[in-house]
Image (spheres, rainbow, N blue to C red):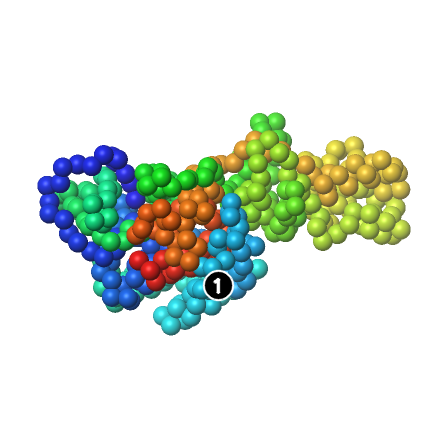
Amino acid sequence: MDQKSTSPRKMSKPLQSVDVVVLGASAAGLMCAIEAAKRQRKVLVLDHANKPGKKILMSGGGRCNFTNYDVSSDHYISHNPHFCKSALSRFTQWDFISMVEHHKIPYHERDHGQLFCNDSARDILNMLLKECRDNGVVVQINTHINSITQADDKQFIIDCMHSTRSSTEQTCYQCQSLVVATGGLSIPKMCASPIGYKIAEQFNIKVLATHAGLVPFTLHDVDKQRFSELSGIAIDALVSFHSHQFRENILFTHRGLSGPAILQISSYWRPGEVVLIDLLPSHRLDDILSTAHQETPAKKLKTILSQYLPKRLIATIVSEELLDTSLQNLSKNEIQQLHKCLHEWKVKPNGTEGYRTAEVTLGGVDCDALSSKTMEAKNTKGLYFIGEVVDVTGWLGGYNFQWAWSSGWCAGQYV
């Protein structure tokens, strides 16, 4: 959704009344609309994009990582870590999987319990849109919000502009329940917008500071120049920041570091701090050197290490002088130095690539201002917030979609 103006316009059109208006035609919004319509509520979904579900379509490399076999509150980041428990327990990953299977969508499991469509993410979007059609939900795109107000009877008035190929006209809707499912700020080219936060602030609901999550790191100029030639190399690694650690691939890029393990740790990392990377998580350097020294003591260090790591990476991380040293001539201090290079490689990112490539937005509407059972704002009856706009952010691996399904489903039972 987009907000052109926060001030109400003089309404030139009569009010069109519906029971529920959902702002945002993506995962959480469509799920909420479906559930509300099943309860015989008259539901209208508004979105400013030219197509519904754009982030669904581009997710998972076009295959949509729609949930995970293993879902718990431990897979989420929030100022209130307990908030997501109710929704996740009432509409689970198994409930969504049943929905997928009911629509005969083929899917498969990848590493760490991640579930993807066999064919296309469009299968998931088509399923949601079919459910909307079957239950009488109206989905209206190309609609920009001008203002949202509350009438004396506490109904919400949404003043907006609806564009078609031939014209743009003002439209005004009145509803008992208003659901904000506008997402976060990640991936602006997918029509990301701050309107959800603005709506929260308009109704005196606290919004926690937002920043990019599940996002690649950029490096300082010196490191970027040093590692730029490694662009395209991916290796298995253990990446740590304080008490958090992830074991998956890291990918060297021409700007810095990416890959699943980097994306995961980026949601916890704070600017100015150091990330630790173990480049040999399946081996211990001492064991490698001890065995090699017994069998081939005259071999150079680089010959041994090249059996475990790409040669270009070794040449960049370890000094040339040390690499040309034979195993039998390695000193204790040199082995300790090597251990730090490979098992405790310290990286101090310059920053992240920001919302441009971030998969999610951390922070958002304060959970403490919402009911964990209904997603309704505690201070404004009939106003609901669901999905990414709320301060609940999942790990990589289908968790953010599951939060969208669960929070949308819960709100749909009450709107």
Image-quadrant location for residue 3: top left
Q: Which residue is mark 1?
A: 89
Left or right: 360 in relation to 198: right
Relative to 321, is 99 on the left or the right?
left
Mark 1 falls on what kind of element?
helix
Q: Nearer the viewer, residue 353 or 328?
A: 353
Q: Position of residue 263 (x, y in %)?
A: 54, 45
Give the residue drawn at x 16%, y 45%. Answer: 171
Q: Amino acid at mark 1?
A: Ser
Q: Please say if 236 is above or below 227.
A: below
Estimate the x, y position of residue 238 in percent, counting from the top left. Answer: 66, 48
| Closer to us: 142 or 19 | 19
Indicate the position of residue 91 as horizontal and vertical percent values.
Answer: 43, 64
Q: Nearer the viewer, residue 188 or 301?
A: 188
Q: Residue at x 72, y 46 (%)?
A: 306
Please identify the quarter of the rendering in which residue 193 is found: top left
Instruction: Write the residue at 47% across / 40% down.
Output: 212
The picture quadrant where one finds residue 208 is top left
Residue that appears at 61% across and 27% down: 222
Question: Residue 385, position in %: x, y?
Answer: 37, 50
